[in-house]
Amino acid sequence: MPTPKKVQEIAEITELLQQSQLSILTDYRGLKVADLQALRAQLRPHQASIRVVKNTLAAIAADGVGLEVIRPNLVGPTALVTALGDPVAPAKVISDYARTSRILQIKLGVLEGQVIQATEVESLASLPPREVLLGRVVGGVQAPLSGLVGVLSATIRSLAYILQARSGQLQGGEEPAA
């Protein structure tokens, strides 16, 4: 019979897994409390957090949200990183921290309900931020449109020059050359 505290913790982990855009399972073995606090501080501005979880409780929560496939990775000391907003920035923070500390290990991730491997988390971290990607899309759409506007305005400009020249001819009393 689970205690009320464990039931509450399972509910919290379940809610985190459901609401987060990105969840990353990490092995934090060897990290000091101060290091974990520093990592939390780096994640906080990106609407992300890291939480040490008990494997059995995390497995129950994962089963509750249909993520049974992460169960084999719930071994050893596990910390769960969850990102509620843009998934790229927290993935970059975790990836950089794992690379520099050489202590934190990425086990796997869950991106919008799809399980991704540690290498894919690294690939996600190498993407530019969402704003940059949106800017590239807008630029890609804008370039052909501005070219079309330039072609159409050149045609209209040419017509305006022809009409202006003809108007000048008629006002000057000159006969148009055939």
Image (tube, helix red, strand yellow):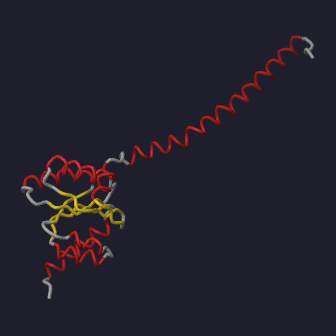
For the point 10% across and 52% down, the residue is: 35
- Residue 65 occupies quadrant: bottom left
Vertical arrangement, residue 3 with respect to residue 78, above or below? below
x then y, percent, for residue 138:
50, 43
Q: Position of residue 104 (x, y in %)?
A: 16, 55
* Mark count: 0
Describe residue 10's horizontal placement relative to residue 18 as left or right.
left
Left or right: 98 with respect to 136?
left
Name the residue rendered at 14%, 50% in the picture. 102
Which quadrant is home to the N terminus? Answer: bottom left
Where residue 76 appears, x then y in whole percent? 13, 68
Name above or below for residue 35 compared with residue 22. above
Quadrant of the frame with the C terminus: top right
Displayed quadrant of residue 19: bottom left
Q: Residue furthest bottom?
A: 1
Q: Position of residue 162 (x, y in %)?
A: 80, 22
Q: Taking 50 as reference, is 147 left or right?
A: right
Q: Residue at x 44, y 46 (%)?
A: 134
Query: In this picture, is 1 found above or below 9?
Result: below
Going 29% across and 52% down the picture, which residue do you hit?
122
Q: Is residue 37 left or right of residue 162?
A: left
